[in-house]
């Protein structure tokens, strides 16, 4: 079933698995003789772990476990397309040491608005970053991994080759407008949990920060393909030790920024999920490693000073992330994480004096 999207594990056959592993170089002789399936659910997907068995004498890497992810891309009021498929099959296939789980097969159907991925199952050796407290070693590994992805598509020439233009003013304004209603809902419901100046800071940010973002797009140096959601649940880390890490689940919505300042991915990771003392202690050595790794991978003309300014500019975007959850009102789910997230990003805006940029 070449290029056929798998929507249920019942579609998987032994000949198909054999062909897929042969094509990926993981099975050089013999065949898949049997497999067992454990099924589960993700946020927007169903998944299955395949426990593999091979014929006698089979040769090659013969992965013992595979992870099948099956995704329906249309949600209630938004959608995402083939980005996760191209993440594994096109965008970084020739990027050295890219922090991606090995992908054996992937297909997207525009007609069905569905796709699947068949990946190495790394759960025996890895957990999500949410399961371990962030350390400097983790931050440095994350900085190097993101630099590997970002350097690959850095700047105007490479983005033109990727047919991925920097977002225009209208797109940026739409991105901001989607999140803005959340401010009023949060101030009304949780104003007593905010510092007195924070409601004004948020209103000022929404009024003036988008113009600073739009002005920054005039210079393509610093822009690249981004992941956009480098949260702690989208990074896999070793159960023991700090490397290798894997960055997973690139699933932007149709209104998300996808060609953007690379350092946004790092800002997102540090501001959204790290507690404030950890972020304060680690952010500068992590950013320095990211800058050094960009240069090692061939990025030129992007100064440390520019990176710091871009970090401050994109750190303020954490407010959009924290308030977008409440664009339709404050939900019970938001109370479980939202106040902490918002306090973290607003404290970072204060620490970094982000408002001085606009």
Image (tube, helix red, strand yellow):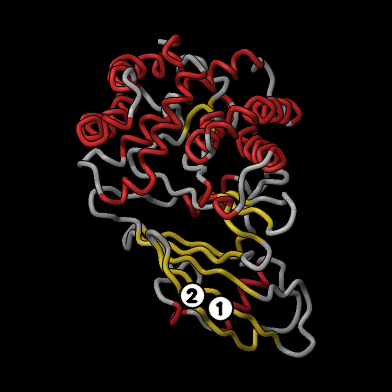
| Observer-nearest of 91 and 203 | 203
Q: Residue 287, image x and y in percent?
A: 65, 27
Residue 278 versus residue 155 in the image, above or below? below
Where, quadrant-wise, is the C terminus in this rendering? Answer: top left
Residue beneath the point at 44% across and 49% down: 251
The mark nearer the N terminus, 2 or 1, is 2
The residue wearing badge 2 is 1
Residue 56 versus residue 219 in the image, above or below? below
Classify mark 1: helix, strand or loop: helix
- Res 27 label: none
Residue 175 versus residue 230 in the image, above or below? above
Q: Residue 81, image x and y in percent?
A: 38, 51
| Observer-nearest of 331 and 46 | 331
Q: Using the rendered image of the protein, determine whether residue 160 is visible from the camera's viewpoint.
A: no
Residue beneath the point at 65% across and 53% down: 237
Which picture quadrant has residue 292? top right
Residue beneath the point at 66% across and 31% down: 286
Q: Using the rendered image of the protein, determine whether residue 323 is visible from the camera's viewpoint.
A: yes
Find out whether the residues at labels 2 and 1 contact each other: C-beta distance under 8 Å: yes
The residue wearing badge 1 is 16
Crowd rating for badge 2 (residues with CA inside 10 Å; few <14, some 14–19, many 20+): few
Q: CA distance from mark 2 to mark 1?
A: 7 Å
Q: How many marks?
A: 2
Classify mark 2: helix, strand or loop: loop
Residue beneath the point at 59% across and 84% down: 35
Q: Is residue 40 left or right of residue 144?
A: left
| Observer-nearest of 287 and 70 | 287
């Amino acid at each position: 079933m070449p290029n056929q999207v798998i929507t249920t594990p019942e579609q998987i056959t032994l000949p198909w698995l054999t062909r897929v592993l042969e094509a990926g170089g993981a099975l050089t002789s013999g065949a898949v003789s049997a497999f067992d399936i454990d099924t589960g659910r993700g946020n927007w997907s169903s998944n299955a772990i395949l426990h593999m068995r091979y014929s006698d004498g089979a040769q090659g890497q013969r992965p013992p476990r595979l992870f099948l992810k099956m995704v329906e891309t249309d949600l209630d009021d938004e959608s995402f397309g083939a980005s996760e498929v191209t993440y594994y099959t096109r965008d970084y296939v020739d990027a050295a040491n890219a922090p991606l789980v090995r992908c054996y097969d992937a297909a997207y159907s525009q007609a069905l608005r569905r796709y699947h991925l068949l990946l190495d199952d790394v759960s025996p050796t890895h957990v999500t970053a949410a399961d371990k407290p962030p350390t400097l070693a983790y931050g440095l590994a994350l900085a190097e991994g993101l630099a590997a992805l970002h350097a690959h598509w850095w700047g105007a020439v490479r983005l033109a080759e990727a047919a991925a233009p920097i977002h225009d003013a209208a797109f940026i304004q739409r991105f901001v407008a989607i999140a803005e209603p959340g401010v009023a809902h949060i101030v009304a419901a949780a104003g007593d949990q905010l510092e007195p100046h924070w409601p004004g800071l948020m209103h000022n940010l929404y009024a003036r920060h988008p113009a600073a973002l739009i002005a920054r797009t005039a210079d393509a140096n610093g822009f690249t393909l981004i992941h956009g959601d480098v949260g702690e649940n989208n990074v896999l880390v070793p159960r023991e030790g700090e490397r290798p890490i894997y960055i997973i689940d690139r699933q932007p919505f149709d209104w998300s920024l996808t060609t953007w300042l690379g350092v946004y991915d790092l800002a997102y990771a540090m501001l959204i999920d790290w507690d404030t003392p950890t972020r304060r202690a680690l952010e500068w050595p992590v950013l320095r490693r990211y800058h050094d790794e960009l240069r090692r991978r061939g990025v030129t003309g992007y100064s440390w000073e520019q990176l710091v300014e871009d970090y401050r500019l994109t750190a303020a975007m954490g407010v959009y992330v924290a308030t977008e959850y409440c664009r339709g009102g404050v939900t019970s789910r938001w109370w479980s994480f939202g106040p902490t997230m918002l306090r973290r990003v607003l404290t970072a805006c204060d620490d970094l004096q982000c408002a001085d940029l606009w």
